[in-house]
Image (spheres, helix red, strand yellow):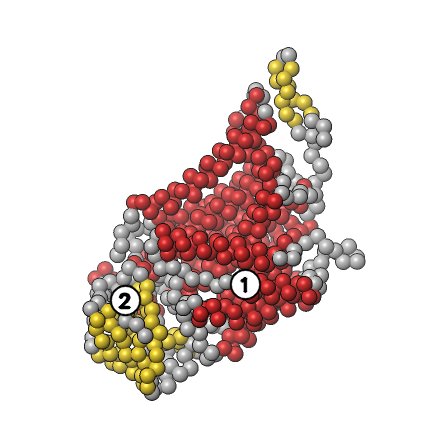
Amino acid sequence: MSSIQPDQWVYVAAPIFAYCIVVLGLAAAGWESSGWRNESGRNPVSASFRAVSASLERYTGLPGWSMAGALTGLTASGIAVLGLYWDVAWHIDNGRDNELFTPSHTMILIGLNGLVFAAAIAVIFATLHRSEAGIGFGSLQVPWSALVMGALGIGAVVAFPLDDLWHRTYGVDVTLWSPTHLQLIAGGSLGPMAIWLMIREGRRSVDASPSMLGRGIEVVTLGAILTGLSTFQGEFDFGVPQFQALYHPLLIVAAGAIALVAARLALGAGGAVLATVTFLVLRSLLALLVGGALNHTVPRFPLYIVAALVVEAAASGLGTDRRLRFSAAAGVGVATAGLGAELAWVELSGWGPVSTNGLAVAIALAVVVGVAGALLGSALGSAADERTDDAGRFVHLRPGVLGAAGLALIVAMALPLPRTVGDVDAVITLDRIGDEANVAIQLTPTDAADDAALFGLVSWQGGGRVSSELEKVGPGRYQSVRAVPVTGRWKSMVGLQRGDQVMAAPIYLPADPEIGAAAVPALAERRVAFGRNTDILLREAKAGPAGAALAAYAGVAVVSALWVTILVLAVTRVRRSTPAPPPPPPVVPTARPGGWVPRHVSA
């Protein structure tokens, strides 16, 4: 296993250092322009907060509490997502880590705690400015969006020690989709939604008109929502999936439908395209950092370009006033034209082969996911909508429709969960070329891979990831198109997916004394039966008490339900909020013979 390099901690410290520099710059600019430095008796901490707030308001045109919380949240989200992709890439390339607080783990923890810190910052600033946003708790003023952000951050941070306990109980299962990992990822991935709500709540609290910078921050946040929702595709991004291949298109459709419909409603014409462009910039930077600067496997990502254009076309052709009609059209478009473009991108970019087997089922489920996601995205985007019908009521979807959409999304995502094993045997023949080997496979029955959704070779944890397609050269006989590594720390296997059967057979596995696992040597010829792919991919996992797993999954369900409840409440409250009355003229100090005294500045 690779050791952590000391210089990698620079990536942990750099964004925190940059954040501190920006805060100091904002404080200095606000302090100088306000004249507070000349006022005696003012609490320096309170004055510094007010100075930062004043600078943010001047530059963005939005309330200081809203921008302080939102920009802190964006910083935290960026740190967390880099830590997540770095951590996944590290495990795929190198295997287990020997310590809990690695640079990538530390970044994830800092980012998730950063969401809690951002919520606290928003509360402090809103309280100092006596903002009427949110709800009062004693002397504190708590914006609704800060409640969401704090809940997401706390729920995700709580999962961190639980994750360590999970690994101690069940072994090191390097998968994104264990219950504790899902709780960690979901808290951080939904964070940008809370950040965007904070921006909108700030705008509504004072009927503010953002500057160009303020509008740009909102666009970035909506792109971050799409980025966050796309993190659940991580195992497919890195090409080592442990679940049915059907999940990949469904996850792409769900993320695109929710985020792009919300962006179109939030930003108006072109909003879906702007969010997509922002997503492409963010994910390209992420790929450059992980695959370039950190020298790990490059995470692939969908483009969402056609999906964005479909959403724009639906809004332009049908309008957005009739939300059910618009959402249905946008969702179907994302699930058909948008998904078709993504599958073409997967094939043409060399990300992986696309099979037409099971495509009808995939499209049918994708349409359900697309429409449900678009309806939920419409509900999220409604926090930005001020239009009313003839009776003066806000344009919105009925709660029953949204409840049905949420249920449909859950059911559609649960259907591909089962994983079984079919009766398939293989004779694996190796043609060694140094440390690598070309692989030939003879399947029994000979038609075992004819209806496969995925069939190929993958090697990992030897310092990178290598894959090879299998070319059919005879009845049930296949040949690798390239050699794969079969020595050292590398692990190599052949994977086969057809329907709900998710199987694999080993080609080479090194001995692992730490977990008592024997080697599977690279033999010139081996006859083997396909088994569960997790028997190879999760080699470090071990059996444990069923009660602990049940408690973990129940905990995720409860936390998720609380998150959804708070998010729905916040969206509803932010939408219904009305601008506060204009504040009194600002008080700034002016020189008088007896010293500095405040005076009012007329508009």
Sort mark 2 into few (<14), some (14-19) or many (20+) by Cα contacts within 10 Å. many
How many marks do you count on the picture? 2
Residue 132 x, y percent position in the rendering:
66, 40
Tell me the kind of residue under disc 1. Ile
Can you say which quadrant of the picture contains the N terminus?
bottom left
The residue pinned by badge 2 equals 491
Residue 369 x, y percent position in the rendering:
56, 68
Vertical arrangement, residue 372 with respect to residue 451, above or below: above
Q: Quadrant of residue 485?
A: bottom left
The numbered mark at residue 305 is: 1
Residue depicted at x 38% and y 45%:
12
Residue depicted at x 67% and y 45%:
204
Residue 537 x, y percent position in the rendering:
33, 67
Sort mark 1 into few (<14), some (14-19) or many (20+) by Cα contacts within 10 Å. some
Residue 86 x, y percent position in the rendering:
38, 54
Tell me the kind of residue under disc 2. Lys
Residue 136 at least partly seen = no
Residue depicted at x 70% and y 31%:
584
